Image: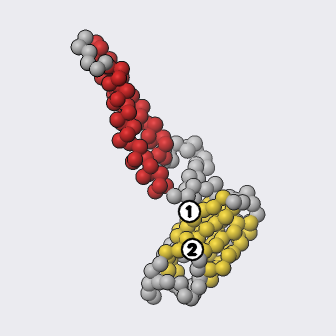
């Protein structure tokens, strides 16, 4: 076998090993939206009230819906409230959907299992980027960049093996 096919096979093997991991990582990423939204508190008792906010949406209105409360409209980034149904199942987690001009973001809302305090708000702004200074250099690289980086590492290793084999005159 020659060195060029060996380098190709090492690259193909690296991609085959890393592709499933990148796909699994991509599934865990969740929503990426251009606007921020939150549900406060993130855990509430049946019949309780939650405060909903949505900011940085270019539209003046953001529609918020869930199985456990009536659809609410958030105006101009200001807060809105929603009353959770009294028959909401304790211990269940419901999805709260924020719709900004067709772009949708999701936040969890957990129904408390007993009497007790509430939890801090669940503020969500995945993929928001930097507002100043770092230029986005401190963000998560994401699955596509991770796979590309590992592919470059595999190519470098394969090329190094090829050059070492070629220099020694042994060939494969």
| Most distant residue in the right direction | 60
Please state if 13 lies on the left or on the right of 79 as rendered: left
Give the mark nearest the N terminus, 2 or 1: 2
Please state, as top left, top right, bottom left or bottom right, where the C terminus lies in the image.
top left
Residue 159 place in picture, x, y as percent: 36, 23
In the image, residue 166 sits, relative to residue 50, either above or below, namely above
**Element assignment for label 1:** strand
43, 17: nearer the viewer: 17
In the image, residue 138 sits, relative to residue 125, either above or below, namely above
In the image, residue 89 sits, relative to residue 2, either above or below, namely below
> Circle 2: is it few (<14), some (14-19), or many (20+) Cα within 10 Å?
some
Residue 61 place in picture, x, y as percent: 74, 66
| Residue ID at (53%, 74%) | 94
| Residue ID at (69%, 75%) | 72
| Residue ID at (53%, 84%) | 88
- Residue 60 visible (yes or no): yes
Residue tagged 2: 40
34, 5: nearer the viewer: 5
**Element assignment for label 2:** strand
| Residue ID at (51%, 58%) | 30
Quadrant of res 149: top left
- For the residues bearing labels 2 and 1, Cβ distance under 8 angstroms: no
Whole-angstrom CA distance, mark 2 to mark 1, is 11 Å
Give the label on residue 124, or none. 1
Please state, as top left, top right, bottom left or bottom right, where the N terminus lies in the image.
top left
């Amino acid at each position: 076998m020659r060195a060029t096919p060996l380098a190709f096979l090492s690259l193909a093997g690296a991609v085959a090993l890393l592709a499933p991991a990148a796909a699994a990582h991509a599934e865990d990423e969740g929503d990426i939206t251009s606007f921020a939204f939150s549900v406060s508190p993130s855990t509430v008792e049946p019949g309780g009230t939650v405060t909903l906010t949505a900011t940085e949406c270019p539209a003046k209105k953001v529609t918020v819906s869930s199985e456990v409360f009536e659809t609410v409209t958030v105006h101009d980034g200001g807060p809105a409230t929603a009353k959770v149904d009294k028959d909401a199942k304790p211990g269940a987690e419901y999805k709260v959907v924020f719709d900004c001009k067709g772009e949708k973001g999701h936040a969890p809302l957990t129904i408390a299992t007993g009497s007790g305090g509430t939890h801090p708000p669940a503020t969500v702004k995945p993929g928001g980027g930097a507002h100043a200074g770092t230029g986005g250099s401190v963000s998560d690289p994401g699955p596509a960049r991770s796979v590309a980086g590992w592919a470059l590492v595999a190519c470098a290793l394969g090329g190094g093996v090829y050059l070492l084999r070629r220099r020694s005159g042994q060939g494969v």
